[in-house]
Image (spheres, coloured by chain):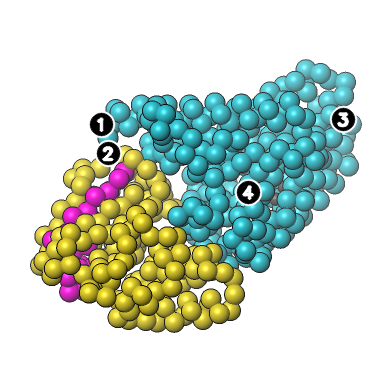
Amino acid sequence: MRQFFPVDDLARDERFVQTNMAKRMADSRSAVGVKKSAKSRGASNRLTPDRHDASEAARSLMHGIMVGEIQALEGAGRTAHDFAAGDGSGDTIPFELKLDMARQAWDEARHVEISAKLSDWMGTELGQFSENTVLFEAACSNDPVLRLAGVNRALEGLAIDVFTQMKEFGQLAGDPFLEFCEDWMLADEVTHVKMGSDWLRKVTENDPDRRAKALEFQQVVDKLFSFGGARGDSDESPIGLARRFRELAGFTDDEVDTIAEMDHDALEERKAAVRLAQEAAGV
Amino acid sequence: MSTIAVTPERFTLVAYDADRIAEITRGLAERLQLTNPIVIEVDERTPLGKMSASVDSASSDATIRLQLESGALEDTKNLTNFSDTRAHLSLGRLLLRASDRLRDDFADAPPDRDLTNAQNTAWKVYCGGRLERLGLAPIQQQYRYDFRNRFGFRDDVDTLFDRLWASENLGWHDLPG
Ligand SMILES: [Fe+2]
Ligand SMILES: [Fe+2]
């Protein structure tokens, strides 16, 4: 079986259309107020049922979760397969880490099924929205430790934020399935982050440079996964930062504060970019 | 035949064509036997999909004004690109709303901006059933989910949904909200 699968080779049927971060950021429209005036700042975009477009926004996010689960399954599966078993030095990984990745792949497969069923329940057709492959891109590093940082800490951390938001949405809307399905998946994601944190620490125990490099990579990925501030502490972000569940998953307060700052920066940078593009277009 | 004006005439942030929007609207207006002048304003600065319909009087020659954020016409598989299917459903719904507003028994309906989420959704469902009978293909489960979100996830709410979906010739006070 092939090792190190590039993102372009992911197998999808004709229902799915893929996109990436560059295309997404080239879209010069914005759902948040981009003007510098005080009035346009701080309007709430949080994904809650009282939004006028709540169901449509929830469908779009749910579809994003579903394809995200497919990519998380692919990422964990690749990591279990791509590296030889060894002592963790070079490009080997401990056998127990492979077992954890296999277990994660099993969880993600279940999440794909749950998310597909939830999408159906909400009236979404599979492939109805474009699939951003940025999540899998974080799982393409040749260094297994960078994969742990990019996938198990950044991607799975984002999953914690998104599931917390959707769980709350289901609870407020009184949706009898959404709330508890999200809760079940959330419990798994907390475990996936914890596995990443524990293995990252263990494998880099005697290699501080490698650890520093991995944490640096995680920051880059975290900022990318903010999707231009779509995730963040501010109410302008549709998805909040789930501080409590991140804490349970082993993120320190400092780490979460750093992510919150990056989310804020990503939001402001995105607003500035959209402002410039719209001014240039004369709209 | 309706006169139809679309702004902007040229889109810069999305790949939409004002002529195509006018053409789809003309076809739908003919099927609904609407001959009023129609003004369409698309806000291409936002990807959101809010939309509204108003009429400047209740007379038969009133001007119909349709306002849409760009997301209401968008192909969700290829963002910033136009979707004919989506445009038919969005513009069809707005024209049905406008034709409702021209009826005496919709005189009490508040302007779109003042509708509650529940009123807005109930009206949307009433339009959805009619769009299906016009030969378009709204996904009923989406409308059902929206309706449940506003009115509750219960059997009696589903029954009410089914009745609304199958209805024709309702007045404003027949809609729940
Ligand atoms: Fe998952
Ligand atoms: Fe996961």
Q: Which amino acid does label 1 sit on?
A: Gly
Judging by colour alone, the chain drawn in yellow in this rendered image is B
Q: Nearer the observer, disc 3 or disc 2?
A: 2
Circle 1 chain:
A
Report the front residue among A209 and A31. A31
Report the mark closest to the observer, 3 or 4. 4
Tell me which segment is drawn in magenta.
B25-44
Q: Colour of chain A?
A: cyan
Mark closer to the observer (1, 2): 1
Q: Mark 2 points at which residue?
A: B12
Give the foreground label among 3 and 1.
1
Identify residue for label 1. Answer: A282
Residue A4 sits inside the magenta stretch:
no
Chain for numbered disc 3: A
Residue found farthest to the front = B108
Mark 4 = which residue? A165
Task: Tell me if I can see residue A105 in this picture.
Answer: no
Query: Are the numbered discs 3 and 2 placed on the same chain, yes or no?
Result: no
Q: Do the residues labelled 1 and 2 touch (CB within 8 Å)?
A: yes
Under mark 3, the amino acid is Lys
**Residue type (three-letter) at the residue carrying disc 4:** Gln
Q: Residue A173 appears at what percent x and percent y? A: 59, 61
Q: Locate residue A191, reporting x and y percent.
A: 80, 45
**Which element type, helix, strand or loop, lies under badge 1?**
loop
